[in-house]
Structure formats: C-alpha cells, structure tokens
Amino acid sequence: MEILVNLDVMMAKRKISGGELAERVGITPANLSILKTGKAKAIRFSTLMALCHELQCQPGDILEFKE
C-alpha cells in the first residue's frame, strides 16, 4: 500500500512551472520537488490547501491511495 503523489500531472495540466508554483504557494522549490517525487513523509494541510487553490483542484487530484 502506498500514497502516490500526482502533483507533476496536475502541474502539467495547468501548465505551471515548479518555481512559479512554489512561489505562489510559499514553499521552496526544493520542498516542492520533494513533494513531486513522492519522497515527502508528510504534508501540512495548509500546504495542500494552497496547492489545491493554485492548481484549482481537489486533494484527491494530487494524492492517490494504491494497494
């Protein structure tokens, strides 16, 4: 079982770069990269909310549970 992070897919759909999204959300590009690659151990709800706001999506569009 794992949680997949589809942040790169949503960024591509919205045609936004990592640097631009990181700036809009208020996190470093390095931290955004950690989220995109699925190496993050946790994500703050405030960060998830900001990502969803900027990408105009739902949390389930970014995070996916796989068995």
Image (cartoon, rainbow, N blue to C red):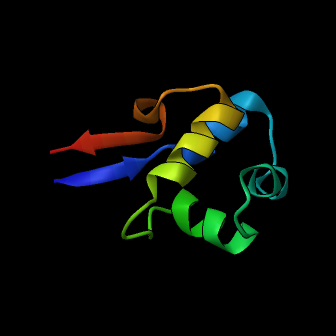
Image position of 40 (left or right of 8): left
Image position of 49 (left or right of 25): left
Is 10 situated above or below 3? Answer: above
Horizontal and vertical percent position of residue 24: 80, 49
Q: How many marks?
A: 0
Q: Quadrant of residue 56?
A: top right
Q: Quadrant of residue 63?
A: top left
Horizontal and vertical percent position of residue 23: 82, 57
Q: Quadrant of residue 34?
A: bottom right
Residue that appears at 46% across and 58% down: 44
Is 59 situated above or below 22? Answer: above
Is 2 situated above or below 56? Answer: below
- Residue nearest the viewer, comparing 51 with 34: 51
Residue that appears at 37% across and 49% down: 4
Which part of the image, by quadrant, shows the C terminus? top left
- Residue sitting at the far front: 46
- Residue sitting at the far bottom: 30
Image position of 37 (left or right of 27): left
Residue that appears at 22% across and 43% down: 66
- Residue nearest the viewer, comparing 8 with 29: 29
Horizontal and vertical percent position of residue 28: 73, 70
Residue that appears at 40% across and 32% down: 60
